[in-house]
Image (tube, rainbow, N blue to C red):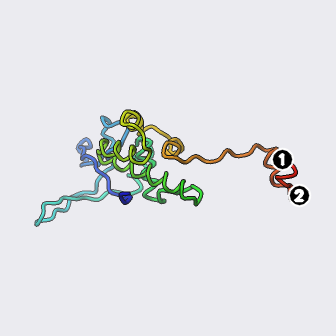
Amino acid sequence: MPGLIVSGDSRGALVARDGRGAGFLPDGMRFRWNPIGVELSQGFLACWSCGHVWGNLRRDELRASIEKYGKESTRQYCDAVEHGPAHGLPDCPEAIEAARGATEIDGLILMGGRPEATRRFRELTQTTWDEALAVIRGWDDLAREKKLALLGWAPKDKPGPEESAMLDHPLRDRLLDG
């Protein structure tokens, strides 16, 4: 199985900000046509050896922009980068593997690799190409729980209030009480 790479790097575009300088518009946003962007600090740095150019922006503004304008999968990927792929899930192998798979596919899609994401989904789920293509086509808008279920893990149904009270009783015996 390929190794999971969870990176905080983001591809995107520089956008003009009405004469106020430049902004960064990350890939994976719902409104690509809306040049909101996150304002970059004044000036850029450049490497004379390789030609790499970079600037700085406020991390909290970037995260707020992604939360407000990002696609569901982009927000989920950011959460995985910050808190780990299996954040909020029980410590069981099935949940962890499903979370790693969902994060890997989110990352592939975010970096422009839908064909790779389709292939990887197919490898993880043993589905047909048609099924994998259909799932990946709508992947950006799927809730995390749905992605985890597609990858083979879903939480067990929680008992209702009455059942929960019965299960918590100290003298409850599953064999005798049913």
Q: Position of residue 100 (x, y in %)?
A: 45, 55
Is there a contact, CB below 8 Å, between mark 2 and mark 1?
no
Three-letter amino acid code at the position of disc 2: Leu
- Residue 178 is tagged as 1
Check disc 2: other Cα within 10 Å, few if <14, some if 14-19, many if 20+: few
Three-letter amino acid code at the position of disc 1: Gly
- Residue 52 is tagged as none
Q: Which residue appears at 45% of the width and 59% of the height?
A: 82
Please determine whether, in this image, residue 4 is positioned above or below residue 71. Answer: below
Q: Which residue appears at 23% of the width and 44% of the height?
A: 19
Relative side of 18 to 74, left or right: left
- Residue 171 is tagged as 2
Q: Which residue appears at 57% of the width and 59% of the height?
A: 92
Residue 160 occupies quadrant: top right
Q: Which residue appears at 44% of the width and 45% of the height?
A: 125
Please determine whether, in this image, residue 22 is positioned above or below residue 86. Answer: above
Mark 2–mark 1 distance (CA, rounded to whole Å): 13 Å
